[in-house]
Amino acid sequence: MAATKGLEGIIATESSISSIIDDQLTYAGYNIDDLAQNSSFEEVIYLLWNKQLPTKDELDQFKGELNREMAIPQSVIDHLKSYDLKSVHPMAALRTAVSILGLNDEESDVMEENANKRKAIRIQAKMPAVVTAFARIRRGQEPVQPKEGLSFAANFLYMLNGEEPKDLEIEAINKALVLHADHELNASTFTARVCVATLSDIYSGMTAAIGALKGPLHGGANERVMKMLTEIGDEDHAIDAIKEKLENKEKIMGMGHRVYQSGDPRAKHLKEMSRELTELTGNSKWYNMSVKIEDYIKEHKGLPANVDFYSASVYHSLGIDHDLFTPLFAVSRTSGWLAHILEQYEDNRLIRPRADYTGPTGQTYTAIENR
Ligand SMILES: CC(=O)SCCNC(=O)CCNC(=O)[C@H](O)C(C)(C)COP(=O)(O)OP(=O)(O)OC[C@H]1O[C@@H](n2cnc3c(N)ncnc32)[C@H](O)[C@@H]1OP(=O)(O)O
Ligand SMILES: O=C([O-])CC(=O)C(=O)O
């Protein structure tokens, strides 16, 4: 049997969480454009986990449940303080911290459906506190406790900066969280499903997914986009720098996608946000440079910008450290990972494909002293 490299085009599961059809992304049937325009991230988490939008009462109750579970145990904070965070990537710290959360959860290995739903709320709620605790400890500051009454997006910024964010900042983070929440069978989600399909626990699925998202061909691309923009430095050098990269067969981060042909429907929202925020901070050059690169790659390589491309200048404009871009992606994508993990448990079968063996055959064993 012939292998399909990278499993391109292979249908590996059924799912009713999100779909990409004709370059349109929907969460449980709702178009991403409507959700980005109108919904809170909490509403989207509820949608992904329940396949229906909440009523006002259901949403209030759900927000309350998330709010109550946001603080992280002291053991995670002590752990983060115990090593030199300057030399640690926050995605590596997040991967380990989520594993420690599992050690603190007495239901960690309880595989019953309601226990799994309770763990999903605990994990989702605690992700911002882990990422922001890391960021603050690295800056020599104490972690800030979540504030009751603030939205998920506002709490992320509040715990990061220690002060209540402005409405525009909350709006931007909320929209980014909505846009990154789920994306069918992307690499990290598939990783999570493969892991829990062995009937391993949710925390194992989460740490596996975080590891997959960290890579530069996936979620790690957003940090690399900003690195590229910073290295290029100004608009006038953008095209020459991109030409040189292409000549050297380097990939342009934030460009291209396995599934989308005409374009990633999330990118236009982030592009508009990038335009607004860079203008507001007096640093339009990041937006202008990004547009030049996008246009050039589209014209010369036929590749569209993906979700990671404009999120870079959005997060930069919000003052977020560049290596926190992917952890912020993980905070959002946790909602999708958990939805897929719960869906996998509902109708599980071990995921075990085959490999097309290309190595030698019929070898004769030689004793070690004769080799
Ligand atoms: C949230 C997300 O995960 S979105 C994706 C984030 N990742 C990135 O932005 C990294 C840059 N992009 C890429 O590496 C790719 O486009 C991927 C990984 C997203 C998709 O990859 P695949 O579908 O496997 O395409 P593949 O890597 O095989 O590329 C196909 C061709 O397009 C080229 N290509 C694809 N993306 C790029 C790019 N960003 N820059 C330059 N060339 C590219 C490849 O070099 C290859 O050319 P070739 O056939 O001449 O060798
Ligand atoms: O679907 C993919 O391959 C990658 C992606 O855009 C995402 O995970 O959001």
Image (cartoon, helix red, strand yellow):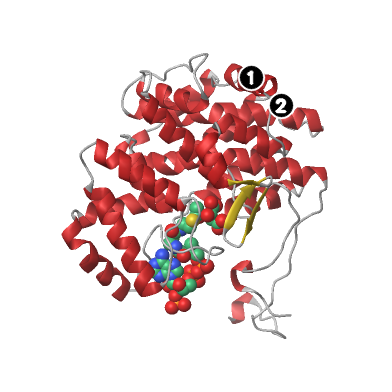
Residue of label 1: 60
Instruction: State the residue at coordinates (35%, 53%).
Output: 225
| Mark earlier in primary sequence (2, 1) | 1
Between 307 and 271, the one nearer to me in the picture: 271
Position of residue 144 measured from the top left corner of the image (x, y, whole percent): 42, 18
Between 5 and 84, the one nearer to me in the picture: 5
In this image, 139 relative to 95: left or right? left
Q: Quadrant of the N terminus?
A: bottom right
Residue of label 2: 118
Front label number (2 vs 1)? 1
Against 53, is 248 above or below? below
Residue 359: quadrant of the picture = bottom right
Between 205 and 239, the one nearer to me in the picture: 239
Instruction: State the residue at coordinates (50%, 63%).
Output: 257
* Secondary element at image label 2: helix
Against 217, is 77 above or below? above
Position of residue 135 measured from the top left corner of the image (x, y, whole percent): 38, 30
| Amino acid on which disc 1 is placed | Asp
Against 203, is 122 above or below? above
Q: Quadrant of the C terminus?
A: bottom right
